[in-house]
Image (tube, helix red, strand yellow):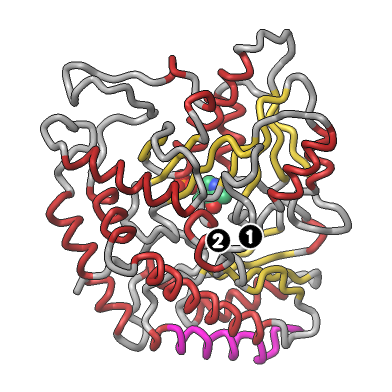
Amino acid sequence: MTTQQKAADSSGLDLDVTVRNLGSYTTAVLPPDLAHISHRLGGYNIVNNSEYPFIPEMVARCVKRLSLLWHRGEPQAPAAAVSGSTEAAMLAGMSLLHRWKQRGLPHRPNLIAGRGAHVCWKRFCAYWDVELRTVSGVGGQVVADPARMAEACDEGTIGVVATLGYSEHGLFDDVASLSRALRRSGRHAPVHVDAAGGGFTAPFLTPELNWDFRLDHVASISASGHKFGQTALGLGWILWRSEESSPEHLWRGADYIGDGKPDIGLTFSRSAAPVAQQEHLLSRPGAFERYRIDLADCSSVAADIADVISGDPGVRVINDGTTLPVVAFCDREPGTVERWANRMRHENWIIPTYPLEANPGLGQCARIVVKPGLSPHTCDRLLASVLRATYNGIRQ
Ligand SMILES: *Cc1c(COP(=O)(O)O)cnc(C)c1O
């Protein structure tokens, strides 16, 4: 048992700070099998693929499983294991940009994304001098309006980013409607789905939701292994629909290391351990069912938390944890959400509060991410704290 898990399983105030931090999406508790993998494979460099041929094989097996989960018809099409969704976003964005450049249009390139899209897209646009056009929701919605996204496209548009799990509230863009809106408008802008969180929850919690390669417009999908993929920190995935979605000249190998096979990435040396953990998690017996059960547990804890919080008449719960196991709520009365978070802080839970970028008019918001690996006892304590914080007079 790892130190963190010991802490998570004991009672009182000695929970590891990573467990008490309820705002974070990344894996905090490594169960013994994964900790063992970290220990054994931590020193293997992912780029040394001719010395350790099992590494590219593990990557390939993960990609095959992800292709199955995300309905990719061509499991051999380009894909890469990278350091996280941020690096995946850079590579997806670069592929979109270079594909667009091949058309030789005289415009300044632009990228469409929902307001509140992750900061990695602001970085991509700043680093590669692309105009970021953000699109808001209609009628106070906190996810982007698909019709407005299609309207924002023009000849300079390199692509549209749909977010599956905005980090600030956890809700999903409607990718199927976006695809329809793009078709109706006659715009053939490719879509990248930033499924940092949702890539590892939607296939299990809402398998009927159509957001992935089943939709023609979706050219690439990225996700974080180290969020709901449940690996240790340092893993992201990017899968492209086909050879054409990622220009060949972006793929380079190094002959003096590995076997010179074409590869893509902004980083080089990294630990192979998170990939080995991902392969273990995706290939163990009943793997998908185990993900489904873990996530359904998280969702049900999130639903209980949302239920308690919504008992306060002034609070507006905007996510009750059905799609991503995240509870997000807002309150327009100044100071209320901060008081609530402070009460939680007194019981040692760390919860971020912020105005939503997608809709600051909703007032101050807070989010609780319910991650796999919390012991039932920790969940009970959490729920008890939420009850006390909500009903012990957060209004003055
Ligand atoms: C967390 C997150 C990212 C960045 O992911 P990292 O793996 O931390 O780089 C990008 N997009 C969304 C929607 C996220 O939630």
Tag 1, which secondary structure? Answer: loop
Location of mark 2 (residue): 202
For the point 70% across and 30% down, the residue is: 189
Q: Are marks 2 and 1 in contact (CB under 8 Å)?
A: yes
Magenta residue span:
379-396
In the image, residue 383 lies in the stretch drawn in magenta: yes
Which residue is at the front of the view, 339 or 162? 162
For the point 39% across and 35% down, the residue is: 76
Few, some or many residues within 10 Å of mark 2 (<14, 14–19, 20+): many
Question: Residue 54 at what x, y percent from top left?
Answer: 17, 42
Which residue is at the front of the view, 139 or 309? 139
Question: Residue 244 at what x, y percent from top left?
Answer: 52, 23
**Amino acid marked by disc 1:** Leu
- In the figure, residue 343 lies in which quadrant? bottom right
Viewed as shown, does residue 250 lie left or right of 173? left
| Of pointers 2 and 1, the one earlier in the residue sequence | 2
Of the two numbered discs 2 and 1 in the rendering, the one whose residue sits closer to the viewer: 1
Q: Is residue 204 above or below residue 99?
A: below
Location of mark 1 (residue): 209
- In the figure, residue 172 lies in which quadrant? bottom right
Mark number, residue 366: none
Which residue is at the front of the view, 308 or 282? 282
Which residue is at the front of the view, 69 or 199? 69
Label 2, ligand 1: CB separation under 8 Å: no
Q: Is residue 385 above or below residue 43?
A: below
Q: Is residue 260 above or below residue 189?
A: above
Question: Residue 227 at what x, y percent from top left?
Answer: 43, 57
Q: Mark 2 to mark 1: distance in Å?
A: 7 Å
